């Protein structure tokens, strides 16, 4: 279900958990980022056999979460189940390369060892993950469906609201714009004998509106805008900033999203790109995005007391 209903017990529990974790981060003098990541799945039937899916792998969110932790943020990682996970992406892909990288050392207590030479990024990734875990710098929260995502975003946003301007929202998840309300969904599997399928979907309410106005009104909010047509990208980003009154839109085109993005604010526009040399060195665009947004966040936090004084 995509309508925002009163919080479920599971959402209330997530809100409590995120609030307690955020309080610890604050006591340590850390900023906090809520990173959303991955696509959402929308069922076409109540006992769902079929879903409307999207392309998002979650790599943007996972790579950004790693960088944000490295930059000193506590990161609440609200991600689609089984999408790319911070540091786990250095593991061999699921399948024969994973099985081939592992060996069993026989003996009374058999041990599994990994061939780290085949995966040179694995050791630093495991070390960085272990550090993040020991410092409690990464709080993963999982969603699968669209309704679950919306409810958990609200729960996490409310939990981070007390942090004011030191909370960053980094909304990289690719959230469906369309869904079928529960009341209009067939209960059972749609039958192909009934002929070609026609469905009408409703618009998913944009969560940026209540996020900025109600749930965390003092936070630094970054949304992501995806288009396939580059010629409308910046206009669409500007329209979103006008409409929702948040701070930054990171605009990207599907095919070039790994190498280039536009960072758009109400009064600026900046392209971040990887050079050929950086690409061959394995530099990731998220490194540039996060470092740029971290400085913007600092500037935003420094301005806040002035803005609040003006309002009073
Ligand atoms: C993005 O634009 C992300 O950068 C990507 C990352 C989803 C393209 P991957 O997960 O891809 O690394 O494979 N996210 C937001 C996309 C989105 O749905 N934005 C909404 C829109 O464009 C606005 S909130 O209307």
Image (cartoon, rainbow, N blue to C red):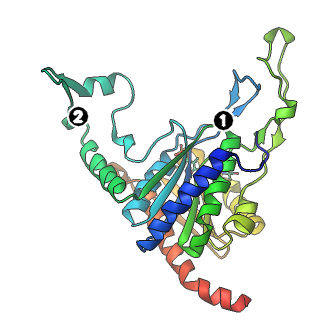
Tell me residue 196's x, y (percent). 83, 17
Q: Is mark 2 within 8 Å of ligand 1?
A: no
Q: Which residue is at the front of the view, 239 or 311?
A: 311
Answer above or below: position of 113 versus 62: above
The residue that mark 1 highlights is: 41
- Residue 165 seen anywhere in this rendered image of the structure: yes
Tell me residue 165's x, y (percent). 58, 75
Tell me residue 277's x, y (percent). 33, 55
Quadrant placement of the N terminus:
top right
Q: Is residue 101 left or right of residue 8?
A: left
Identify the residue shown where x is 39% and y is 28%.
Answer: 94
Identify the residue shown where x is 47% and y is 58%.
Answer: 75
Q: Which mark is residue 118?
A: 2
Tell me residue 204's x, y (percent). 78, 46
Q: Which residue is at the front of the view, 19 or 177?
A: 19
Q: Which of pointers 1 and 2 lies earlier in the amino acid sequence?
A: 1
Q: Is residue 288 left or right of residue 157?
A: left
Answer above or below: position of 287 versus 197: below
How crowded pointer 1 is (Cα within 10 Å; few <14, some 14-19, many 20+) is rated as many
Identify the residue shown where x is 85% and y is 12%.
Answer: 195
């Amino acid at each position: 279900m995509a309508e925002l209903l009163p919080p479920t017990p599971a959402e209330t529990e997530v809100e409590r958990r995120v609030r307690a974790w955020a309080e610890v981060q604050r006591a340590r003098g850390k900023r906090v980022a809520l990173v959303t990541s991955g696509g959402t799945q929308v069922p076409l039937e109540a006992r769902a056999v079929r879903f409307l899916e999207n392309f998002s792998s979650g790599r943007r969110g996972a790579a950004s979460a790693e960088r944000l932790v490295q930059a000193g943020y506590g990161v609440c990682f609200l991600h689609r189940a089984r999408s790319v996970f911070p540091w786990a992406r250095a593991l061999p892909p699921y399948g024969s390369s994973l099985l081939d990288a592992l060996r069993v050392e026989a003996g009374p207590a058999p041990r599994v060892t990994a061939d780290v030479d085949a995966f040179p990024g694995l050791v630093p990734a495991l070390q960085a993950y272990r550090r993040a875990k020991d410092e409690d710098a990464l709080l993963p929260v999982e969603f699968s469906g669209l309704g679950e995502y919306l409810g958990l975003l609200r729960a996490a946003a409310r939990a981070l609201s007390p942090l004011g301007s030191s909370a960053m929202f980094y909304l990289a998840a690719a959230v469906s714009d369309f869904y079928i309300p529960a009341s209009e969904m067939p209960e059972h599997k749609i039958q192909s004998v009934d002929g070609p399928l026609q469905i009408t979907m409703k618009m998913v309410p944009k969560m940026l509106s209540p996020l900025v106005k109600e749930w965390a009104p003092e936070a630094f909010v970054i949304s992501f805008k995806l288009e396939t047509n580059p010629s409308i990208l910046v206009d669409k980003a500007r329209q979103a900033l006008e409409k929702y009154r948040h701070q930054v839109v990171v605009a990207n085109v599907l095919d070039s999203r790994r190498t280039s993005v536009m960072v758009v604010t109400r009064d600026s526009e900046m392209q971040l790109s990887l050079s050929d040399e950086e690409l061959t060195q394995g530099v990731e665009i998220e490194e540039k995005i996060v470092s740029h947004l971290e400085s913007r966040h600092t500037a935003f936090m420094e301005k806040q007391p002035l803005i609040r004084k003006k309002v009073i």
